Amino acid sequence: MIHRHFMLHKPDGYLSQLAGQVRKKKLLGELYDFPPGTMCIGRLDEDSEGLLLLTTDGKMSHYICTAAVEKEYLVQVDGLITPQALERLQGGVEIGLRNEKYHTQPCTAVALETVPALSARSRKIRSDRHGPTSWIAVTLREGKLRQIRKMTAAVGFPTLRLVRVRIGPVLLADLPAGAVREIALDAYFNDHPAAPSSLPAPGPASSDHRKPPESSREEMLPGT
């Protein structure tokens, strides 16, 4: 069986699912006509943005979700992050997970000196008059529910914006928000257990696709 794989720049305000009866929610199937059997490899929260991989290959999905593959995020936090807070993040912090306490694994967390060049959000974070913010880069090998948001809150710097920019060797780069690109994940993850793909190497930016707006969300979901 020939599998197909995609990278998508998930905008804020979308659920990480392709279809379903979810009232007044935006779904990824509105952005692209994915083939039957396509699944998200991991998830991003509704308010989170950035790189999301999709595939029809269950083995590929399982491998990329393991600790063998790093995930990197750019995170805007409320306040000016301190070296002490970064050190705590790096060593792991205690967060709540399904009504239990969980100590996160050691990770990489560094402060960014400049504001990263990212796509504009559909919804503003908050006004600058409410105080300063700062940006950090966090790299994990695990992905618990709302983990980074809980981690930064635990050290006193709530997350305002969260953008995933890398999954293993796959970079978000300049893929526009809402755009989808079909890629050959086997070219990136040649040590995974899935069968080889027959797709070509990742194409240029001109191969990006975004489904044109045909109707509003209210029109697309029955019963809304």
Image (cartoon, rainbow, N blue to C red):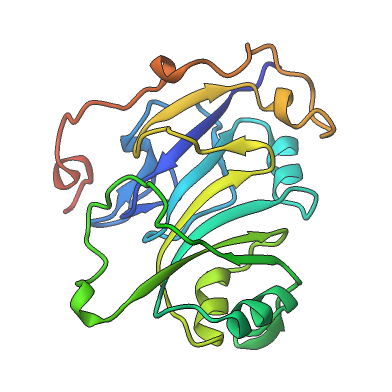
Rendered view: 213 above or below 23 = above
Whether 101 is drawn above or below 224: the answer is below
Image x and y of residue 180, in percent: 42, 29
Position of residue 196 measured from the top left corner of the image (x, y, whole percent): 77, 19
- The reply, left or right, for residue 179 in relation to residue 104 is left
Residue 2 visible to the viewer: yes
- Seen as rendered, the residue at the extreme front is 113
The count of marks equals 0
Name the residue: 31% across, 36% down.
30
Residue 2: x, y in percent? 68, 16
Residue at x-position 16% and y-position 54%: 224
Choose top left, top right, bottom left or bottom right for residue 185.
Answer: top right
Quarter the N terminus occupies? top right
Q: Nearer the viewer, residue 89 or 193?
A: 89
Q: Nearer the viewer, residue 179 or 3?
A: 179
> Which of 119 and 100 lies nearest the eye of the viewer?
119
Does residue 111 sit above or below 130 in this rendering? above
Q: Is residue 198 above or below residue 154?
A: above
**To which quarter of the image does residue 198 belong?**
top right
Q: Which residue is drawn at the image coordinates 32% and 27% (left, top)?
A: 210
Residue 21 place in picture, x, y as percent: 33, 51
Q: Judge left or right: residue 67 versus residue 144.
A: right
Residue occupying image coordinates x 68% and y 60%: 140
Residue 97 shows up from this direction: no
Q: Is residue 141 left or right of residue 38?
A: right
